[in-house]
Amino acid sequence: VAGLVEAVRARLPRWLGGQPGATQRDALALRGVGRDAVTLAGGELRAVFRVPGVPLHAMPDEEVEGFLGRWAACLNALPAGVHFLTRSRSGGLEGYAEQKRATATALATRGEAALARLAEDQAAHAERLMAGGGVRQDEHYAVVRGRTEAQLATRCRQLQRLMDRAGLPAARVRDRALVEALARQWRAGSSHHFAVYAPDWTLVYDEGRTPAARVTPARYATGTAISPATGGRLGERPR
Amino acid sequence: VRRPPALRLRERWDELRWRVDDARRERAARRLLSLGGRGVLDELAPDAAEHRRDAYVVSANGQDCWTRTLLLDWPPEVPASGDWLTGLRAEGDVTVSLHVDPVDPGKAAGRLKGQRLWQTSEAQARALQERLDDPDTQQAIADADALLRAVRAGRVRLFSCTLAAVLRAPTEAALDELERRVRGQCDLLGVPCRRATWAHASGFRSHAVPTGHDTVGRPRTVDSRVLAATFPFQGERVSMGRGVFWGTALVTGEPVLLDVRDAGAGFAAPHGAIVGPTGWGKTTAFWTVLAQELAAEAPPDVVLVDPKGTDYARITTELGGKRVRLGAGGVEALNVLDLPPVDASQPGADPVREQTRIVLGLLELLTAREGEALDPDQGAVAEDAVFAAYREAGADKDDAATWSLPPERTPTLADVQRHLEAAGEGDEPARALARRLRPFASGTLRGLFSRRTTVALDAPVVSFDLSALDRALRPAAAYLIGAFVWTAARRHPRPRVLGLDEIATLLAHESSARLCGDLFAMGRSAGLRVVAMAQLLTDFERTAEGVRVLDNAATVLLVRQAGGPAVEAAARRYGLSAEEQRFLRDVAQRGDGILVTSRGRVALHVEPSPLALTWLPPAPGVPRDGAAGAERNASTAAA
């Protein structure tokens, strides 16, 4: 029923309150993103956990053996299908570079030219390192499946307990962090900005900071417009 | 140009209006989203998506992201170290995904029995044909038997797993190049891999997005031992994600950011130590960290001890600091008898006695033989002489009301020596001590040790150049500086950094070692962060005070060590693994090191910014451009 209502609503003209969906919404294969779970197109639920990295390379052999033993025990007791995922990419100094730039501006305003130059150089250095792949950041996730909310909650508790015992304290990804985790995968240009668009403005979320509002043109295609810039693909790029 | 007040008022008004408008728009946006119709999924969706035979392209925010899914298998022999997936990730924007579905033990046992039956039949068929036994079949039967027993006993479980890597790049050419590199890594590990041809979109959704829905995988059954050795979460735990950028972790490439002044993050004291032989990047590492602390909105005051006289000269000049050249005939002097302030908040504090202890330390450094303390008789007469000098100037050790002494009335070492000589008329220890003290109090070195303080810590950077001093006098000068900074820090507490190079000379004497221990143990209360540099870890471990220094250091950076004993000492103290020991002994290049903190330890390459690097004296044969540095990092990481 919800799908039907949505389909009808999407087809209504704007002046009747219709909101056409994004051109590639189906690509996500999701029905919705809730406060602490993702609903797949088929109705199954998924809970996402953020997992800290473990420096196996810095551990003595006996410690590695012990850790992997505990990890094997955790795997042996896994409730049901679990998805482990690690993304490694250039970056990790965005916040640092931004902070150094702000500091450079503040120092220059105070007339401390040498320190401002130093801060500016440090910001540029961090950006160069990120651009050249010199620094990398890793994101580790564990995803739990569930058919119902109750089942999902039970499995989540079980996974968290098992991972704690293995020395991997997993933290549930919720709310905005959950949306951002998905946005980082789907929106290539959103490495550290996640934007919510509306017809005449854009709300830009900056990771880890207070949301700031900006006004920009809409990104949705109107009517049958196909941008030549996309090489004939459906959908219009934002200006 | 001063703008007219009306214009400024108008600007203020506009700004206020814009802010109100922004807030209104944000509220409207939230209302719209809460109404439904257009939900967060529309915002998450890419602007364009394109399915190709060998790639899936998602475009958003004007950028294309070319993705390709490689379905991986396990290598014939899974390394027990558990970190074999890390190499695959290091090549670019790569997501390694592992879908794990436990197989029901009953079903697993059934499957294993079936497999064993099939292999036994094959062996029997060979026997009937009077052919020799196939060792592989025999081995497989034995393995199936062992696994079946383990599964039945509940020691091992079987899993249906899919392993995949999703590659991302901004262009098709870059994606091809990334795939070539990842395939190279797979070949090295013996991991078979193939493209998910025509299924890259499903591959992306299944393996790159944390939604746990596998639609393309070709599951393979593995047991829990193999699965445990395929550990996907290799990473660093040292970095706090904020603070000073120390460098890049050599194994994972993650940036190491630490804020050592954050007590909440588990750092008891903000101090640091850097250990390693000359020429392996101690000064560069120290300056890299210090430069970032300085380039902050509220930079600390910095005091540097520069034994060579060249290390911090340019830094001081560039930052408009003050360079103090200490020498026998120099114009600058520090008076060791300067009293710290009377701290009303600490009822038990006694500045006269505290400072007397520091003065006795200097006397010991100046008059006792290396490594020896003042003998008890000399210690007693020296203490009396110092008390007498203070009393004469108006500060009585037993009268708290007299403990505030202005610098112009503070006694000097000459006054102490005069009291020693007066006491020495019938007292041999006092006479001997006075004789030994004469060169420093009234002789050739009077200008340095026996004058009122002429130095003020009124510049952002103050560096003390000790190059004009005789090598034997440097420990005393460093001690004098340490005592001076400690007094100044207690008098005007604010964030300060004290850099002590060649701390081993201070740790060699009991009294100066005690001062170092005190600085590290109590410096935090006065906002002081002390960073000590030494060539060997054993320089610290030789004395109890040295150990106290290490215990209070939030960070210890071990750069390449001089040899076997040095590495063994580090391994003993910090429990370094065999690999880490090999790294410190043979592999580490200039700027590489192991950073030990209370959060763990990490092998890293220190990353100074280019400008900061130019402010240090050049080291022969060291490349200074970023590309060369990156190449060096890559080669070290590979090693």
Image (spheres, rainbow, N blue to C red):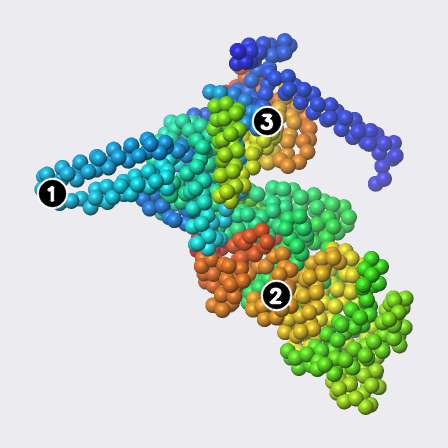
Q: Quadrant of residue B550?
A: bottom right
Q: CA distance from mark 1 to mark 3?
A: 66 Å
Is the residue B490 above or below the residue B166 in the image? Answer: below
Q: Mark 2, chain letter? A: B
Residue located 64% across and 64% down the image: B549
Q: Are marks 2 and 3 in contact (CB under 8 Å)?
A: no
Residue receiving disc 2: B547
Q: Nearer the viewer, residue B58 or B535?
A: B535
Q: Are marks 1 and 3 in contact (CB under 8 Å)?
A: no
Q: Nearer the viewer, residue A117 or B298?
A: B298
Q: Mark 3, chain letter? A: A
- Image-based side of B442 in relation to B205, left or right: right
Mark carried by residue B131 = 1
Q: Is residue B174 visible?
A: no
Is the residue A77 above or below the residue B334 in the image? Answer: above
Name the residue furthest bottom: B426
Badge 3 amino acid: Arg
Residue receiving disc 3: A35
